[in-house]
């Protein structure tokens, strides 16, 4: 009998968990991503929806692989496994701090348009801050407290300590809320997280508003470092 690698099983299972989450979300809302008319709010809701999906899918996958023997360890014997996030979270957070500062400078020097600066800022906030924090937390939620695993502590990052932490702690509470009770409160949690993310980007020196003419105004200020 042929057995597949643990990495392949993990990847396939995660994709199936994403599909399951999309299906439940569609049944609850009738759509996957926000239909919000406010462009800036829509961007923040989409970002929150994306890392909420990562969190839910990884918790499901990790729980399955920690409870069902799926991975071959030797001579056809299979075992459960406790998964963990594969990248050092603190170093990603420190990269984010540098990238956000550079985006702010480039916007101030007109090297980036405001639209491009907003797009790059959101990409960094997602890829280097909230996505890795959400994925890491999803893995940790399943790992037993007595399990000896390498530290992936975000608190090793000065940027996390000085700026990110209070926003992340509130976000983490909402992620847990969205996961509990069969996802019944995920829509409420999503809107709460969008508000937290709005406060976060404003804390980065970014202001956005809708003008009386219906246009959207975005200003990129000085990012704290």
Image (cartoon, rainbow, N blue to C red):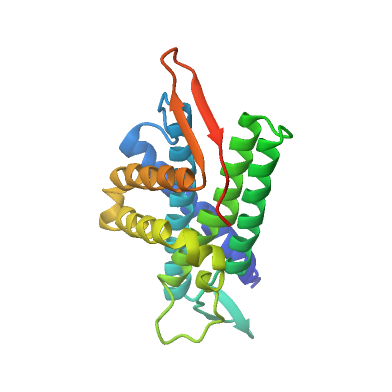
- Position of the N terminus, as image quadrant, is bottom right
Nearer-the-camera pick, 142 or 223:
223
Nearer-the-camera pick, 47 or 138:
47
Residue found at x 51% / y 77% = 81
**Tally of marks:** 0
Q: Quick check: 64 above or below 209?
A: below
Nearer-the-camera pick, 184 or 124:
124
Residue lying farthest to the right in this orientation: 111
- In the rendered image, which quarter is residue 156 located in? bottom right
Give the image location of residue 187, x and y in percent.
31, 42
- In the rendered image, which quarter is residue 116 located in? top right
Describe residue 196's horizontal placement relative to residue 69 as left or right: left
Give the image location of residue 134, x and y in percent.
47, 59
Q: Quick check: 200 above or below 159?
A: above
Residue lying farthest to the top in this orientation: 213
Give the image location of residue 97, x and y in percent.
61, 56
Nearer-the-camera pick, 82 or 204:
204
Q: Quick check: 197 above or below 10?
A: above
- Position of the C terminus, as image quadrant, is bottom right
Give the image location of residue 89, x and y in percent.
57, 66
Residue found at x 44% / y 19% = 211
Residue found at x 34% / y 56% = 179
Residue found at x 56% / y 42% = 122
């Amino acid at each position: 009998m042929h057995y597949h690698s643990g990495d392949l099983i993990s990847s396939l299972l995660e994709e199936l968990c994403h599909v399951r989450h999309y299906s439940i979300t569609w049944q609850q809302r009738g759509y996957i991503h926000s239909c919000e008319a406010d462009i800036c709010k829509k961007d923040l809701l989409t970002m929150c929806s994306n890392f909420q999906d990562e969190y839910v899918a990884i918790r499901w996958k990790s729980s399955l692989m920690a409870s069902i023997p799926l991975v071959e360890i030797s001579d056809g014997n299979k075992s459960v496994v406790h998964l963990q996030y594969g990248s050092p979270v603190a170093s990603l957070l420190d990269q984010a701090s540098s990238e956000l500062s550079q985006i702010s400078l480039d916007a101030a020097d007109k090297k980036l348009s405001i639209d491009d600066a907003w797009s790059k800022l959101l990409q960094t906030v997602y890829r280097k801050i909230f996505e890795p924090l959400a994925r890491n937390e999803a893995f940790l939620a399943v790992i037993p407290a007595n399990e000896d695993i390498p530290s992936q502590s975000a608190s090793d990052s000065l940027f996390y300590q000085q700026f990110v932490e209070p926003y992340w702690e509130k976000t983490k509470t909402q992620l847990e809320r969205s996961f509990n009770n069969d996802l019944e409160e995920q829509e409420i949690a999503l809107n709460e997280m969008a508000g937290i993310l709005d406060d976060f980007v404003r804390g980065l020196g970014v202001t956005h508003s809708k003008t009386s003419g219906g246009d959207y105004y975005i200003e990129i200020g000085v990012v704290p470092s």
